[in-house]
Amino acid sequence: QAQLVESGGDSVQAGGSLRLACAASKTTYSRVCMAWFRQPPGKGRSGREGVASVFPGSRDNYVADSVKGRFTITYDIASETLYLQMNNLQPEDTAMYYCAAALGYSGACGGRWNLYNRWGRGTQVTVSS
């Protein structure tokens, strides 16, 4: 089955920007909820936080309060890629970022972080002050 593969993580200074990408085949992922999660250093999987979600091609687009106004999630069907644009990064944004999909679910996505059952391996974002 098609995997999710993240890229774009890097080390940046506070105030900088990054764009994360997740290769997500439209055949498998264009009709399901897609999301970005992050897991801060020292926290286990239970500490993973939902950051943003989207249903490709719809207005179902949700961004968590902790990053609202700074992060934007999009899915580009042409490139079959899920993106997370992150602006004005702060040290507290330091984490491993994961791309995820909610396979087999067809309802609303926004803020429902327990739906996701397919995960990428993650990409590291480090923000220094």
Image (tube, helix red, strand yellow):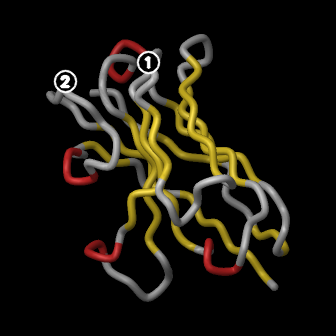
From this view, report whether residue 58 is shown above or below residue 47. Answer: above
Could you tell me residue 121's position as x and y percent?
43, 55
Q: Amino acid at mark 1?
A: Ser
Q: Quadrant of residue 76?
A: top right
Rendered location of residue 90, percent (x, y): 72, 74
Q: Which residue is drawn at the image coordinates 21% and 31% (left, top)? A: 103
Query: Local crowd at mark 2 within 10 Å, few (<14), some, or many (≥20)?
Result: few
Closer to the camera, 32 or 27? Answer: 32
Return the residue found at the far left: 104
Please report the residue visible at 54 percent of the width from the left and 46 percent of the height from the top. Answer: 6
- Please tell me whether mark 1 or mark 2 is closer to you in this view: 1
Give the residue number, with chain letter if any, for mark 2: 106
Q: Relative to the observer, which residue lies in front, 109 or 101?
A: 109
**Label 1 neighbour load within 10 Å: few <14, some 14-19, many 20+:** few
Spatial CA span between label 1 and label 2:
13 Å
Quick check: 57 above or below 97? above
Task: Tell me which numbered mark, 1 or 2, is placed earlier along the sequence.
Answer: 1
Residue 86: assigned label:
none
Q: Are marks 1 and 2 in contact (CB under 8 Å)?
A: no
Instruction: Give the amino acid type for the residue marked by disc 2 in the picture.
Output: Ser
Q: Quadrant of the N terminus?
A: top left
Q: Is residue 79 left or right of residue 128?
A: left
What percent of the width, then of the height, locates residue 16?
84, 63
Q: Which residue is mark 1?
A: 58
Residue 13 as seen in the image, left or right of residue 1: right
Q: Circle 2 — which element? A: loop
Quadrant in the rendering for residue 87: bottom right
- Could you say whether the residue bearing mark 1 is in a helix, strand or loop? loop
Horizontal and vertical percent position of residue 84: 61, 44
Left or right of 82 on screen, residue 44: left
